[in-house]
Image (cartoon, helix red, strand yellow):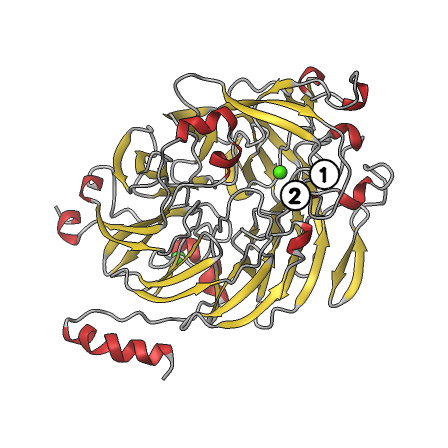
Amino acid sequence: MRLRDQFLTAVGATALCVGLTLPAFAEVTEQDILNDANTPGDVVTYGLGPQAQRFSPLKTLNRDNIKGLVPAYSFSFGGEKQRGQESQALVKDGVLYVTGSYSRMYAIDSRTGDKLWEYNARLPEGILPCCDVVNRGAALYKDKVYFGTLDAKLVALDQKTGKVVWRKDIDDFKAGYSYTAAPIIVKGKIITGVSGGEFGVIGRVEARDAETGEVVWKRPVIEGHVGELNGKPSTMTGKVNETWPGDTWKFGGGATWLGGTYDPESNLVYFGTGNPGPWNSALRPGDNKWTASRLAINPDNGEIVWGFQTTPHDGWDFDGVNEFVPFDMQKDGKTVKAGGTADRNGFFYVLDRTNGKFISATPFVNKINWAKGIDQNGRPIYDEAFRPGDPAKSEDGKKGKSVFAVPSFLGGKNWMPVAYSPDTKLFYVPSNEWGMDIWNEPVSYKKGAAYLGAGFTIKPVFEDHIGSLKAIDPASGKTVWEYKNKAPLWAGVLTTAGNLVFTGTPEGFLKAFDAKTGEEVWKFQVGTGVVASPITWEQDGEQWVGVAAGWGGAVPLWGGEVAKSTAGINQGGSFWAFKLPKTVAAR
Ligand code: CA
Ligand code: CA
């Protein structure tokens, strides 16, 4: 008997007796994906829509009745494997899909929290995830659910059973490749990037046929490398040695580790690219394209349509991977087809999403010192006093001049996604206020070994807080309100038409704020740090909110002095679901 049938036999009779609705395992269509942002009964994409605005039109739940939001269930990921839970769940017709640390996935009944199936990737010895064993989410399409694993494989599972339909190598985990982002589905293709930027891997974006897993195109992001289309070499990215000297482009980094967004209107996918390899910038004079950049790629053939480099010749690990969120901006009485992105380097950028033209950049964290500002072309005005020195110029040749640079390499904002509300016209940015001592050291490329040539210690810049959730007006760059958190913020953000903003804290709270004023209106302690992205959906006429819980991620591993602010926070691994009961909503 197949699992699905067993499940129906076991649960069916009981469910019918008490009048419950059974999970339907409905297929997800292209239209479901494109319309996700407008259909609050499901969440079928990472970001609540391919544009990843993380805005729900639901307004049943609002700042006045949110005190009635109560837990419905907590589903445990089980086992001894805990660490960081950074996943955003998906939910469709009564089934909720959530990934866990160590490359696990669960399908649960979205009403009851009952487990339907569980998939555990068998991970080999010697995987090389840089920044905890996290996974950020899955993708749904037709009858399958997809996710990537820490040993750099992409897996397609049968939605109904959790059985493997296909499993493909993204790349060689022994060379430092891994995978943690949520894949995106565009026109029947599954589009992914790669992780491994600290190991000198070459970043790329690639598309596969979602049915078969066969590669359709590959686009390396470093100049000099040649792409692939339908099994044949396609075009070269840029030109050899244009912005990289000698052989440096061969191990140039630019990992595309945070996944992408898609704008159906301009038919472009947007991916960010990570730091150049190595971190030591003295070893690679030039702009080092396309590292620390945003790229717009044609999803049909993998050609780069435009590129915008936020940190040319990066020397601080300011990965340019942060999500590029398409939105329409009103400025000077006109509608601008814009995209917004809060960069690791501390500046919030607005670009024309159709052509990559620079519109504005404004600081969203305090005390930035590596750049004095951004010029009219979008290029940083560097302050060379805050670039770590060349070790070759030091007395013993082993350690270059150390500088205290702000923000730290974990960024003004790291991976945790922003939300944009078309109601308030504000971006909600989870940021951190910190700096770092950073110095350079000699290094040469060795397969599977860290390719940094740098040392560092992160330190806070304020005494009372590190985390800072900011509401930013993209038209002016001004911060409209700010919520300060003692520990670093590491969770994604969600906003709703009910004038609410949700995010989590390492201290264990899922919190809600008034979207217009920033007033904290609700919180719930889940018993471990929250570093995941919350979702909301409507089910049986009630509004639900859900979030994965489990402390971990890069901060406890790399946070230096800042990691002290989170010492003693317990690990975990669970999915919490909350709802506003009908009786409360009707009051
Ligand atoms: Ca939807
Ligand atoms: Ca990096």
Q: What element carries label 1?
A: loop
The number of numbered badges drawn on the structure is 2
Query: Residue 285 appears in which quarter of the rendering?
Result: top right
Q: Residue at x 71, y 50 (%)?
A: 304
Is label 1 in contact with label 2 (beta carbons under 8 Å)? yes
| Three-letter code for the amino acid on which mark 1 is drawn | Gly
Position of residue 349 measured from the top left corner of the image (x, y, whole percent): 58, 32
Which residue is depicted at the point 75% across and 39% down?
289
Where is 38 relative to 24, above or below? above
Residue 97 as seen in the image, left or right of residue 178: left
Q: Which mark is residue 277?
A: 1
The quadrant the N terminus occupies is bottom left
**Label 2 beta carbon within 8 A of ligand 2:** yes
Q: How far apart are marks 1 and 2 (CA)?
A: 7 Å
- Quarter of image, ligand 1: bottom left
Expressed as whole percent of the image width and height from the top left, the position of residue 432 reads 47, 28
- Residue under the point 52% across and 67% down: 156
**Residue 273 horizontal/vertical position (percent):** 65, 43
CA neighbours of label 2 inside 10 A, class few (<14), some (14 to 19), many (20+): many
Q: Which of marks 1 and 2 is nearer the N terminus?
A: 2
Q: Is residue 271 above or below residue 374?
A: below
Report the residue marked by disc 2.
Answer: 197
- Which mark, by number, is residue 417? none
> Is any atom of residue 301 visible in this view?
no
